[in-house]
Amino acid sequence: MLRVTFLALAVFAATSFAHGPGKENDFAGRRVLLIGIDGCRPDALRKVVESGRAPNIAALIFTGTVAWNAYTGGEPDAETPQETSSGPGWTTILTGVWRDKHGVTDNRFRLHRIAEHPHVFRRIKDAFPNAWVASFCDWPEIHGYIVGASEKLGVGFLDNHHTLVPDPARKGTDYAENDAKLTEIAMEKIRTENADAIFMYFGNVDETGHGVAHKEGRFSPTNEPYLASIAEVDQHVGALVAAVRERPRYAEENWLILGVTDHGGIDKGHGKQSAEERTIWMFANGGLAPRGKVVEAAIPQTAIAPTIFRHLGLPPQAEWGIPFAVPEK
Ligand SMILES: [Zn+2]
């Protein structure tokens, strides 16, 4: 009833409620911001963080929990490893299952089974139809395939989404601009909507590693263009976090901010099973995430989805096939 009352009031007092009802959402004020940085090697991120060039991500890590030794690419002893590329990686992050279940083998998304293992935000909306979820992305496949395949009978489940499509004529050099534009768009929504869960994707670090966004770029902790692209994304992360914290009733809310990458890289590519390509990072800040903790254990990329569910108080159902094993202590 509280929710109905709030919504009814909001119609008449949109401005006074525009910045947030504090605790009055379906999740008692708990909210999630998931930040995805494509193709960001953990050793490179760590170097940028430890050299003071990524103060915003550093603050989230130092006051939260970080895993520098997480992994993508499937379970190490699996018969069918998962390609270390964006299609399989983001699908695993956003559905909580590996390729053996979601069926995404590469960036072409052929013969996938995402409909059987849909996007986390679809699960949230199924359980709480009044929840407000949004996604901002400049790699169009995420919305085109992962979100699209998670819709039921073509009915969308995102309350807001924005896709910035790279201009083919720019040959990958517009990702940095698009990351910045997308940040502005997402900040506006963070300020003006009562988001329960937001996914924010940044593409420029991966394009720099490929030598596309910057011709000298490589996936390496010693490559300056690659490190600079991570430092640039850190500014966007800082802007998003500031928008969250500027919400007038932020003090009554409980935000979990998660960060993750889809894969590493080696030289100018990725896709195979080397440690440089398989090893990823993830961090959690807020909610139940311990402060100042470094998780030494290897954490699977599948851990992001259940961490979101746990924060929102929505335990994964057994039939979803999502392992519910996120370290808390
Ligand atoms: Zn890539």
Image: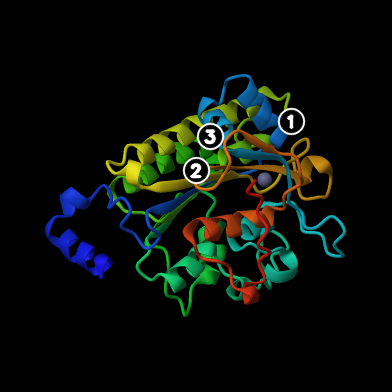
Q: Please state which of residues 99 and 120 is positioned toward the viewer in this rendering.
A: 120
User: Residue 322 occupies which quadrant of the picture?
Assistant: bottom right
Q: Which amino acid does label 1 sit on?
A: Ser
**Residue shown at the point (87%, 65%) measured from the top left:** 79
Report whether 9 appears left or right of 234: left
Q: Which residue is drawn at 50% across and 29% down?
A: 56
Residue 60 is marked as 3
Secondary structure at badge 1 equals loop
Give the residue type that dot 3 points to.
Leu
Q: In which quarter of the image is residue 275?
A: top right
Name the mark nearer the viewer: 2 or 3. Answer: 2
Describe the element under mark 3 as helix, strand or loop: helix
| Local SS, label 2 | loop
Judge whether residue 318 can be spotted in this image.
yes
Q: Answer whether labels 3 and 1 touch (C-beta < 8 Å).
A: no
Circle on res. 220: 1
Left or right: 164 with respect to 202?
Answer: left
The kind of residue on which mark 2 rests is Gly
Q: Earlier in the sequence, mark 2 or mark 3?
A: 3
Marks 2/3: CA–CA distance? 9 Å
Taking the spot 29% from the left edge, 44% from the top edge, the residue there is 249
Q: How crowded is mark 1: few (under 14 residues within 10 Å), some or many (20 or more)?
A: many
Return the x and y of residue 73 as percentages of the image width and height.
Answer: 77, 54
List the residue tagged with mark 2: 286
Q: How far apart are marks 2 and 1 (CA)?
A: 30 Å
Instruction: State which image quarter holds ligand 1.
Output: top right
Q: In this view, does 292 lie above or below 145?
A: above
Q: Earlier in the sequence, mark 3 or mark 1?
A: 3
> Which residue in the rendered view is the most extreme toward the front?
329
